[in-house]
Image (cartoon, rainbow, N blue to C red):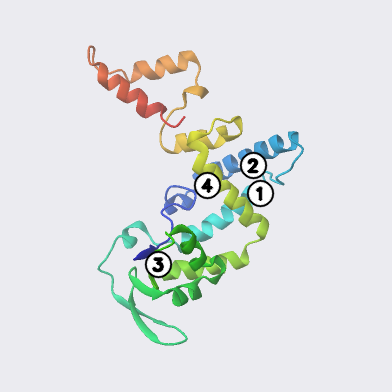
Amino acid sequence: MIQVSSPSSIGLPSKDYYKNDDIVTKYQSAIGQVFEALNNESQKQGRSLNLSIATSEGVLKLEKKLAAASPDAEDRDDVTVSLRMIITESCLTYYKKYYNPMTFKEAEKLAPSIHLSNIINKQTPVDFKTDRLIIMAPDYMKALEETLKSTSQDDLQAYILWKTVQSYASVTESDALKPYKRFANGLQGKVSHRSLSHFEMLTYIRNRMPPKNDGEPVLVTLTTALVGS
């Protein structure tokens, strides 16, 4: 059986972060700086991605809509929710809030723009056959459809590019990605060794030095502080 659910992270690690104005401002700034840097690099190669700091506004607006439609983490994990009802064109069906067996046809009516059956067929083995899905958040699927219809193609493409950047940022060395890496590290309470002077790094280490002759915690502390930078 295949399960379809809302993403655990839209862009920021938690939907609650979108309610924090300071984090949102820094996040949008990081997106804009990365876009501007990527556009400058592409122009040097004779191409243009048509990205700018202003493009980040459309990406953030889209993320906020998707985050607002996403189930809360505690609700998503609650399997004791009450039954609700949904009316389809063909029948009246009772379904649980986060456990909703549906046919492909029923599921695709929730968000026809994403062509769910095509996505699943391309991701599953050739000999795999099923005519039913578990839709974990029907309300999210409906909101997704409305959001896709109301969002410009430019903003959708920019969001897809941004998600690509986020997916590969941890394994990609590029100056263009530094603004996002600094933001991500700051959000997690980590310190990037590339942004510190030698004196600052030594001060950071000394202030966190464990008791003498206890070497292993030093490695753990440094690894925790610098990972992903």
Dot 1 or dot 4, earlier in sequence: 4
Do the CB atoms of the residues marked 2 and 1 lie less than 8 Å apart?
yes
Horizontal placement of 75 versus 175: left or right?
left
Examine the rendered structure and indicate whether residue 30 appears above or below residue 102.
above
Q: Which residue is mark 1?
A: 55
Q: Which residue is mark 4?
A: 24
Q: Secondary structure at mark 3?
A: loop
Q: Disc 1 and disc 4: Cα gap in Å?
A: 15 Å
Q: Secondary structure at mark 2?
A: helix
Dot 3 or dot 4, earlier in sequence: 4
Q: Disc 3 and disc 4: Cα gap in Å?
A: 25 Å
Residue type at mark 4: give it: Val
Q: Disc 3 and disc 2: Cα gap in Å?
A: 32 Å
Do the CB atoms of the residues marked 1 and 4 lie less than 8 Å apart?
no
Residue type at mark 3: give it: Ala
Residue type at mark 1: give it: Thr
- Count of labels in the image: 4
Q: Where is residue 28 drawn, in percent x and y?
A: 58, 45
Q: Secondary structure at mark 1?
A: helix
Q: Disc 2 and disc 1: Cα gap in Å?
A: 8 Å
Q: Which residue is mark 3?
A: 137
Seen at 44% across and 83% down, the residue is: 88
Q: Which residue is mark 2?
A: 35
Closest to the camera, between mark 1 and mark 3, is 3
Closest to the camera, between mark 1 and mark 4, is 1
Q: Disc 1 and disc 3: Cα gap in Å?
A: 29 Å
Q: Where is residue 115 drawn, in percent x and y?
A: 53, 67
Q: Secondary structure at mark 4?
A: helix
Dot 3 or dot 2, earlier in sequence: 2
